Image (cartoon, rainbow, N blue to C red):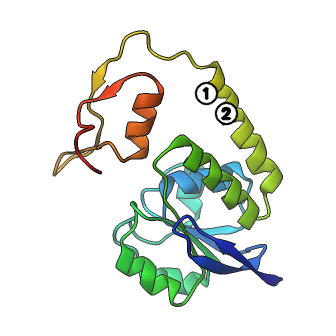
Amino acid sequence: MMLRRFTDMMGRDVDIAFPPKRIVSVVPSQTELLQDLGLEDEVVGITKFCIHPDSWFRSKARIGGTKKLDIDKIRALQPDLIIANKEENEQAQIDALAAEFPVWISDIQTLPQALQMIQVVGLITDREARANVIVDEIVQGFTKMQRAAAAKRVAYFIWYNPWMSVGADTFISSMIRTIGWQNVLADKSR
């Protein structure tokens, strides 16, 4: 196994033992991607919110929530790669982990950024061919998609207690625009 340098979506260079054999995902959507890439044996830790795939939720070590990671549990897993996200995870916790382990951070606000993330995660996990197939399927799906004939005004709630919705500079708001609808909170950020 050799070290290879990759740049994450924050512009940080990350040296990763390639290919990684012990991956911890602290982002539910990226956990699903890792499963789609065929990394059953390589993923050793996920958050309590990584409920898909169900078999992983039942069998993988859980390392806390996306905002309250259990650093000691992660440390005990000795990951050679941690996959994180700028919005999902707390910066102080990610900084603490990055002092000990390679942490690759995504930052996604648009479909092109999501496609780039899929390709790069495929590259850093030695699953580039599968990642390209996934990207092609997504692009084809969006190419065939019919946009809404009339824009619906929508609010997309992501949490309760307190209630939270999405502003203009989010991936979800970008997807709302992509299908031809209007985010009623587009005048807000995050």
Mark 1 element type: helix
Residue 155 higher or lower than 60, as above or below:
above
**Separation of disc 2 and disc 1 at Cα?**
5 Å
Q: Residue at x 63, y 46 (%)?
A: 115
Among all residues in the image, which is located at the extreme bottom? 100
In the rendered image, is residue 133 in sight?
yes
Task: List the residue tagged with mark 2.
Answer: 139
Classify 10 Å Cα crowding around label 2: few (below 14), some (14-19), many (20 and above). Answer: some
Q: Residue at x 36, y 71 (%)?
A: 90
Where 69 sits versus 182, above or below? below
Q: Place residue 137 in its image quadrant.
A: top right
Say which residue appears at 40% left-offset and 64% top-offset: 66
Q: Amino acid at mark 1?
A: Phe
The answer to whether the residues at label 2 and label 1 have Cβ atoms under 8 Å apart is: yes
**How would you rate the neighbour count of disc 1 (Cα within 10 Å): few for under 14, some for 14-19, many for 20 or more?**
few
Expressed as whole percent of the image width and height from the top left, the position of residue 152 reads 32, 18
Which image quadrant: the N terminus?
bottom right
Is 47 located above or below residue 190 in the figure? Answer: below
What amino acid type is highlighted by mark number 2?
Val
Residue 106 against residue 149 in the figure, above or below? below
Query: Which residue is painted at 59% across and 50% down in the image?
Result: 32
Residue 126 percent across, percent down from the top left: 79, 64
Q: Nearer the viewer, residue 81 or 13?
A: 13
Percent coordinates x, y for residue 52 in the rendering: 54, 48
Residue 109 in percent (x, y) is at 45, 49
- Considering depth in this image, is 184 or 103 the residue closer to the camera? 184
Q: Which residue is mark 1?
A: 142
